[in-house]
């Protein structure tokens, strides 16, 4: 019977083409009209360690978050089967290489000793030996799973006999086997696969042909299983659909928003955004040029932020992109920008810390770093995005806010959004508005920091007949270094009172959005990538009779305390729950400090793996029915 949703895990060694598999399947599914979200989880090494793609495919809508258990686990290696034994649901399908059936857990060098011990203990609890064959028998017997054993080596030999492929390159085609197996189970049209392969391997027709031949071999061996996990006919209809990561969404938003200079020093998970901009630095939208964009890889993050500041002073819409360790290095430049009212944008992708921490895992624990980093007091704006759509429009809005108020703007995202791919309706480019703020031609007697207005008249470096000074020291209206106490009071106040202006002029819908029941019994508060799982969890609980609402905070600083307080006081304080990818659920402390409301109940996850809709639903149900104050989530490999 066709299904509304299908969950899939694709697993294999890092560097084995697992990301290519994700892209090929997602584009093919999008071609059919299905909604897809896929989270990519990987170790911080180049090759060898376990990586996996966690997908949710829907015929009814575009999914907002992944869930467990899944319906298909497609494995390239034995490690995937050991790692994801708990992730497949009753009646699920296991695609595996028959040659790994006798592999033992102890024989896999890529699994950390700590992880090996944890898996071995789990297997003992299930009464399962530490061999792949024992796991497969358990899944078949206890969960009614269907085993789809394929002889990977035989399939590759067959391909080698037909095409002149270097034997040492054959391992690259293993990802094609699992794509073919999943496509067969889902009953995807061959033309959709061909279309997707053509996009993935543009200009290399031999790779397209070889992978299609591999698809035929796999289909021949799975005739009885074709369409075994077929989806219902898609209910949504899009003339065009965007398939993009969060990094891509921000990159596109920046380009459409008028970006002219982007600096970066490579760091996970931020660098992909700059790579996307580099590929499209001479672009057009509906025939209108939106480039060129200068993209500069600098020697370090200090140079990255300083060069972006310089470009902003020269009048360019400029930005830099980084993650936690890189942002730490940018802080002196951030303070300089705050003192000199520089409209620079810092796109900040959070990952697991402190220090190097978990460089390829996600987190939201850098909230206070973004809000308060820097010495002295100065105005800044911190915004967050909850999904790919918001990320696109927020990337544009970051420039508008920076130039309108002449403050640094930090666009705060995280690894989960950055590295997940999603099908998304095309952004409405016609709705994008460019707001450059108070720009003047300058001229003789120009006062860059004129005290008569809260937002200073902004002339660009090089303006005709215009002299201006910039310094890291306190300065007068012209920019000259001045230590006079009255000037200090006036200039310091002028910069900081912008925060009141920002709060009063930014419309409510850009500060926060409320989803769910208009008369809720409980309220969930969160920001960033929590949004998708929270909306799913609230909808699931509503079907069980619990009315809930979700407050998606988009303006994190200055914090919209008045609006948050007004919303949260609609329910008793013990019915307000904060959710975050951090130990401390920091949004609770921020609400207490800026809104005077203490959120005492929280859901935390800090394993570096994403919050799934299923585990969040369970946690919220526990809190609202039993009065538990704190639930710590830990599911995920």
Image (cartoon, grey):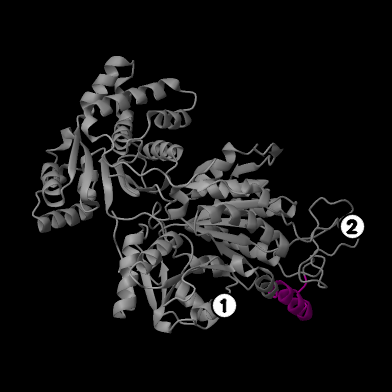
Count residues near mark 2 (Cα–Cα under 10 Å), then give few for <14, some for 14-19, many for 20+.
Answer: few
Residue 179 located left or right of residue 149 = right
Residue 256 located left or right of residue 612 = right
Residue 378 point in image, percent of width and height:
65, 71
Count residues near mark 1 (Cα–Cα under 10 Å), then give few for <14, some for 14-19, many for 20+.
Answer: many
Residue carrying label 1: 561
- Residue 602 covered by magenta stretch: no
Residue 443's disc is 2
Picture layout, residue 379 above or below residue 6: below
Q: Residue at x 43, y 57 (%)?
A: 351
Picture layout, residue 191 above or below residue 502: above
Classify residue 450 by image quadrant: bottom right
Residue 248 point in image, percent of width and height:
53, 46
Find numbered disc 1 in the image and state the secondary structure of the residue it sits on. helix
Residue 306's disc is none
Q: Which residues are magenta?
A: 482-497
* Most foreground residue, 589 or 96: 96
2 vs 1, front mark? 1
Residue 37 point in image, percent of width and height:
41, 49
Q: Residue at x 15, y 46 (%)?
A: 105
């Amino acid at each position: 019977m066709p299904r509304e949703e299908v969950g899939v895990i694709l697993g294999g060694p890092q560097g084995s083409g697992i990301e290519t598999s994700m892209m090929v399947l997602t584009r093919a599914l999008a071609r059919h009209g299905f909604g897809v979200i896929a989270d990519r989880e990987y170790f911080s090494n180049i090759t060898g360690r376990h990586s996996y793609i966690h997908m949710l495919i829907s015929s009814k809508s575009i999914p907002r978050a992944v869930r467990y258990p899944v319906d298909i686990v497609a494995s390239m290696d034995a490690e995937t089967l050991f790692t994801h034994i708990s992730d497949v649901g009753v009646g699920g399908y296991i695609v595996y290489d028959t040659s790994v059936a006798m592999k033992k857990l102890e024989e896999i060098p890529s699994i950390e000793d700590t992880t090996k011990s944890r898996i071995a203990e789990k297997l003992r609890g299930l009464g399962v030996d530490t061999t792949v064959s024992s796991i497969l028998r358990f899944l078949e017997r206890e969960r009614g799973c269907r085993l789809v054993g394929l002889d990977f080596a035989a399939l590759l030999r067959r391909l080698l006999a037909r095409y002149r492929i270097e034997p040492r390159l054959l391992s690259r085609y293993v990802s094609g086997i699992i794509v073919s197996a999943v496509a067969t189970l889902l009953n995807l049209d061959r033309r959709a696969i061909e279309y997707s392969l053509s996009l993935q391997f543009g200009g290399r027709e031999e790779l397209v042909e070889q992978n299609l031949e591999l698809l035929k071999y796999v289909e021949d061996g799975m005739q009885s299983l074709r369409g075994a996990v077929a989806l219902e006919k898609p209910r949504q209809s899009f003339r065009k659909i965007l398939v993009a990561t969060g990094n891509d969404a921000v990159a596109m938003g920046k380009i459409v928003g008028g970006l002219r200079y982007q600096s970066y020093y490579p760091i996970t998970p931020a660098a992909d955004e700059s790579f996307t901009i580099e590929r499209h630095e001479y672009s057009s939208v509906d025939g209108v040029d939106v480039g060129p964009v200068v993209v500069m890889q600098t020697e370090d993050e200090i140079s990255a932020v300083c060069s972006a500041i310089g470009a902003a002073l020269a009048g360019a819409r400029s930005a830099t992109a980084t993650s936690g360790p890189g942002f730490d290095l940018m802080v002196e430049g951030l303070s300089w920008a705050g003192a000199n009212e520089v409209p620079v944008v810092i796109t900040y992708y959070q990952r697991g810390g402190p220090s190097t921490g978990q460089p390829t895992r996600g987190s939201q624990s850098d909230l206070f770093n973004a809000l308060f980093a820097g010495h002295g007091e100065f105005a800044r704006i911190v915004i967050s995005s909850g999904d790919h759509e918001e990320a696109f429009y927020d990337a544009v809005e970051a420039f508008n806010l920076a130039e309108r108020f002449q403050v640094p703007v930090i666009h705060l995202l995280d690894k989960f959004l950055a590295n997940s791919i999603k099908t998304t309706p095309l952004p409405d480019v016609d709705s994008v508005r460019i707001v450059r703020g108070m720009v003047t031609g300058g001229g003789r007697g120009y006062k860059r920091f004129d005290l008569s207005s809260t937002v200073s008249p902004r002339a660009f470096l090089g303006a005709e007949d215009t002299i201006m000074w910039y310094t890291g020291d306190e300065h007068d209206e012209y920019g000259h270094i001045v230590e006079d106490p009255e000037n200090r009071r006036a200039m310091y106040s002028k910069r900081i009172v912008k925060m009141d202006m920002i709060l009063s002029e930014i419309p409510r819908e850009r500060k926060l959005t409320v989803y769910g029941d208009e008369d809720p019994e409980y309220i969930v508060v969160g920001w960033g990538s929590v949004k998708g799982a929270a909306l799913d969890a609230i909808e699931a609980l509503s079907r069980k009779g619990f009315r809930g609402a979700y407050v998606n905070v988009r303006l994190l600083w200055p914090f919209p305390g008045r609006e948050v307080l007004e919303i949260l006081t609609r329910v008793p304080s013990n019915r307000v729950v904060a959710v975050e990818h951090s130990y401390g659920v920091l949004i609770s402390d921020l609400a207490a400090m800026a809104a005077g409301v203490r959120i005492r109940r929280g859901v935390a996850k800090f394993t570096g793996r994403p919050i799934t809709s299923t585990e969040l639903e369970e946690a919220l149900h526990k809190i609202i029915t039993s009065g538990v104050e704190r639930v710590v989530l830990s599911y995920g490999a």
